[in-house]
Image (spheres, helix red, strand yellow):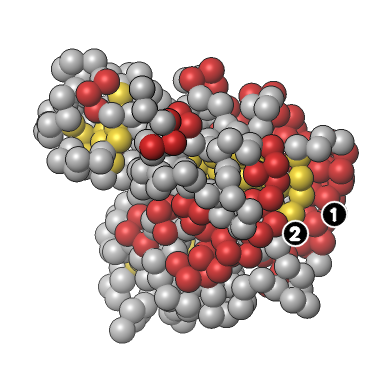
Amino acid sequence: MGDPKASPKGLHDQLRVEFIGDSITAGWVVLNSPGSYINQNQSGEDIFQTWDRRLADAWGTADWRAVARTGIAIFPYQAYGLQFYGIRDRFLCSEYSFSQCCRLPWDFGRWQADVVVINVGTNDYIPINPLKPEARNFQAGYEQLLAAVRAKYPGALIFCLMPLAYTCDADSRYDALYQGLTEAVRGAQDEMIQLHTTGTREAPWLNCITDYVDRIHPTVAGGRKFAERLLPVLTPDVRRFFPQKCGGSGPRCEQDLATPSPTRQTSSETTTAASETSAAATTASSETTTAATTGRPSSSAPAGGAECCYPDCADAQKVCNTESESPFCTSSPANCRQCGGELCSGQGSQTTASPTVPTTAVPTTAVPTTVPSTSAAGTTTRPGSTSTPAGGAECCYPDCADSQKVCNTERDSPFCTSSAANCRQCGGELCLTRAIFP
């Protein structure tokens, strides 16, 4: 046999990293320019352009995953007519569902993380979240998340990041987040559970205007800058605890030879959902998250079974979810597209037939993709109206008269704007508007 150093590291030799977060981790609107509110849906979202992807690249690993969903928080809450469940329950489940019941728990025995990076908590304090827990309550919730992560990954190095929102928002509500998170990590008394701040209000790491799309979600350039600030403080401990997987001495892990380029392998939840983070084609809020997907080579799927493959069936580097791994995404071509992939047969070829497989609980009606309203105050339509009011309809949250309302247009949400009853079902009020977009 030859010198083992002469061969690139295989995937099993690389650092195993999992990111847990909301829309900041999922890449909600990351493709937008600063101040741009277009594409507040899947088309403006790309987890492979995020700060987490930059960290994985710098650590020389393709074996990384993300458990992330736009809008998710430590505690469950309702906003924009949607129910957001807590991140701890989603972490333990194999697939995101609008039901609190997890039909398919994640099998942690199949893969163990070396490093877990947690970046969550912003959505607990966004203006539209009615709860905004006190510091001691946030601490308790964060401690429960840490306990779950430690129980499932007993040997992992866990980095807890202070959310960036604290540095670019002077509102005192984020003081409770800062205090609660700090005390939760301190109380763990675990050398391998570490808190890392991400700047201060006086000296934020990112420019609060030019590095963000909306002062919450970083642009591609902002995410790159965020990763570059994190690497010098995180990598030394990655190297200390995992020297065989992270060589060298600088902020990047050096390998003997170049490792394979990162593949589309990312999460224990499968819907590319709409924090601060984004929802799969059905959801979005001003703060939202994505859950990317865990994949395996399509050849490993049962012959004849359905797979949802990313980015598509024809891609030579595709990774795929089987029916057993992702019942929802493999249940139909439409659901697979909603998850961000293409439905393929067990041999990796495209299929147009909808396989008969069990599905997880999903909403039977559409849910809104919210965008900031740019129109004048709307006018309430007749209750029970079934036709589109002249001039265009909006479904607004919480209602037409609220000065802080956010609204869906007919183009954004055909279902919610089709009648007053449907808008109420989406959690809003149907309003009349003129000239929403020029």
Say which element carries label 2.
Answer: loop
366 relative to 388, above or below: above
Say which amino acid is labelled 1.
Gln
- Badge 2: residue crowd in 10 Å (few <14, some 14–19, many ≥20): some
Cα distance between the residues tagged 2 and 1: 12 Å
Which residue is at a point 52% across and 64% down the rendered structure image? Answer: 223
Label disc, if present, on residue 179 of the rendered structure? 1
Which residue is at a point 42% across and 59% down the rendered structure image? Answer: 49
Q: Is residue 175 left or right of residue 289?
A: right
**Quarter assignment of residue 241:** top right
Say which amino acid is labelled 2.
Thr
Which residue is at a point 15% across and 24% down the rendered structure image? Answer: 347
Image coordinates of residue 434 in percent, x first then y, are: 35, 79
Q: Dot 2 corresponds to which residue?
A: 197
Which of 154/123 is in front? 154
Label disc, if present, on residue 429 of the rendered structure? none
**Quarter assignment of residue 31:** bottom left
